[in-house]
Amino acid sequence: MARFEDTTAIVTGGGSGIGRNTAQTLADGGATVVVADLDRDGGEATVDAIEDETDGEATFVEVDVTNGDDVEKMVDTAVSEYGGLDVAVNNAGVGGQLEPTAELSADDWQMVIDVNLTGVWRCLRAEIDAMLEDGGGAIVNTASILGRVGTEATPAYTASKHGVVGLTKVAALDYATDDIRVNAVCPGYIETPMLEEAGLYDDEETVENLREQHPQGRLGEPQEIADAIVWLCSDEASFATGEAVAIDGGYLSR
């Protein structure tokens, strides 16, 4: 499969989970991938996997998406080393503390918003500038089912992901005539390190409850989300923009 031959892509949060699978799938399709993550070990492991298991090329850039200079450096790396930017996947995110709305601290609120929402905006701003210079491109933002509905004790996360969905729609409208497509994916609960860090794997009852919330009766796999992201980045999705595509085992259909 060479549908991304001569394509340069950026994947934030590329050091694990959905980001790692997306970077590898893009590379397997022929893309050169800039793997961006705050976790150097994870990002470099993704680059190693790409170089060992695909014919693609990859480089790692240490990026904190709350830092505008880091984001500019990330995009500059794609442009200066590989000649431009064709595809961007804004996947970096955090879960935050599980607290009721009135009990969440201001610092925890701000941290989640800075990473999940303002971080996506920072990335979009730099990526779109590069794509305008390069004649267009495709961008996918990772939102969540909690960008479409709410659940208890997730005020900052849910607000940030609703914001990503709205931001995706506005950016798609702003640049539709510039051949820049902007879409989002809304994953259900996926077996990633983020779920482990949130403590949702601490007991089998919690895990089983999460499974039961999905009509298919299971959690998703990172590759299932990566495949949807890569399709949205491809020419096969040339008439899709401004969409927030749920990949959720039926969660939102209840």
Image: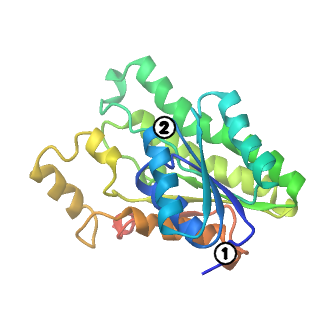
Q: Would residue 140 appear left or right of 250 to someone viewing this image?
A: right
Q: Position of residue 150 (x, y in %)?
A: 39, 47
The residue at the point 51 percent across, 35 percent down is: 38
Q: Secondary structure at mark 2?
A: helix
Q: Position of residue 252 (x, y in %)?
A: 39, 64
Query: Depth check: 175 or 72 in front?
Result: 72
The quarter of the picture where residue 233 lies is bottom right
Whether residue 194 is visible, yes or no, is: yes
- Which residue is the site of mark 2? 40
Q: Position of residue 191 (x, y in %)?
A: 31, 57
Whether residue 247 is visible, yes or no, is: no
The quarter of the picture where residue 117 lies is top right
Q: Secondary structure at mark 1?
A: helix
The quarter of the picture where residue 235 lies is bottom right
User: Looking at the figure, which quarter contains the C terminus?
Assistant: bottom left
Give the alpha-carbon distance from disc 1 to disc 2, as whole Å.
32 Å
- Which residue is the site of mark 1? 237
